[in-house]
Image: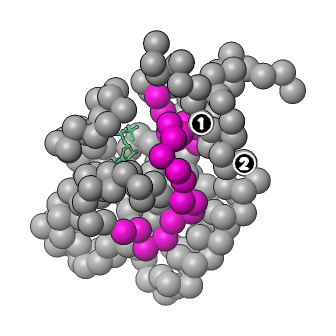
Amino acid sequence: MMKSEMEKDILKVLVTEEEIKARTAELGQALYEQFEGRQPLFLSVLKGSFVFLADLVRATQLKSDVEFIAVSSYENATVSSGRVRITHDLQQDITGRDIIIVEDILDSGNTLAFLKNYLLAKNAASITIVTLLDKPSRRTKAVTADYSGFVVPDEFVVGYGLDYCQKYRNIPYIGVLKPEVYAG
Ligand code: PRP
């Protein structure tokens, strides 16, 4: 297949579609075993996690429901501002619920540190963190994922939900963006 305009901005593929699919199946199975017989609430952290969420819930055949929250701390910058803002809040009471937070990437940890406190303050019974990508080299907050798909190096990754200036989310794999794209 011809390379799309978008793909010409990709330096290299870091995680292929096949690798994502296989790992998501494993994560789905692990979640199924952990929560079998219960009804956890999958909480997708928008926007980045929407692609992963769609595949993960189908890989986890639990009688579960889905909720969304949108937060922002980057605002088109490449480094987290540290201030996390809720731009779309929960639309339901989560008291007593087992929450599975679904993230595309755990980077500085600012987002998940904030969200954990926020959800506990809303009386969640338990919080389980699932992230597709983990970039431990950039962590500034003491947050760890319960389940992580792939550990990635400190490179500018896009695709499979992850963006640069709101673009590239619809690339079906994880790629590294060419530096000239964000330097220019
Ligand atoms: C990204 C990503 C995580 C967060 C992780 O969101 O989706 O939510 O950053 O980074 P952290 O560990 O340093 O907090 P972003 O704010 O870029 O918004 P988006 O999901 O809409 O792309």
- Within-10-Å neighbours for mark 2: few <14, some 14–19, many 20+: some
In the rendered structure, which segment of residues is drawn in magenta?
144-164
Tell me which residue sits at (60%, 70%) in the image: 28
Number of numbered labels in the structure image: 2
Image: 120 above or below 181: below
- Within-10-Å neighbours for mark 1: few <14, some 14–19, many 20+: some
Tell me which residue sits at (61%, 55%) in the image: 55
Q: Which residue is mark 2?
A: 17
Depth check, front residue: 139 or 41: 139
Amino acid of disc 2: Glu
- Mainly helix, strand or loop, the magenta region? loop
x and y, in percent, of residue 144 in the image: 36, 69
Indicate left or right for 13 with 63 as reference: right
Q: Nearer the viewer, mark 2 or mark 1?
A: 1
Tell me which residue sits at (76%, 53%) in the image: 18
Spot the residue most to the right: 1
Magenta stretch holds residue 152: yes
Q: Which residue is mark 1?
A: 176
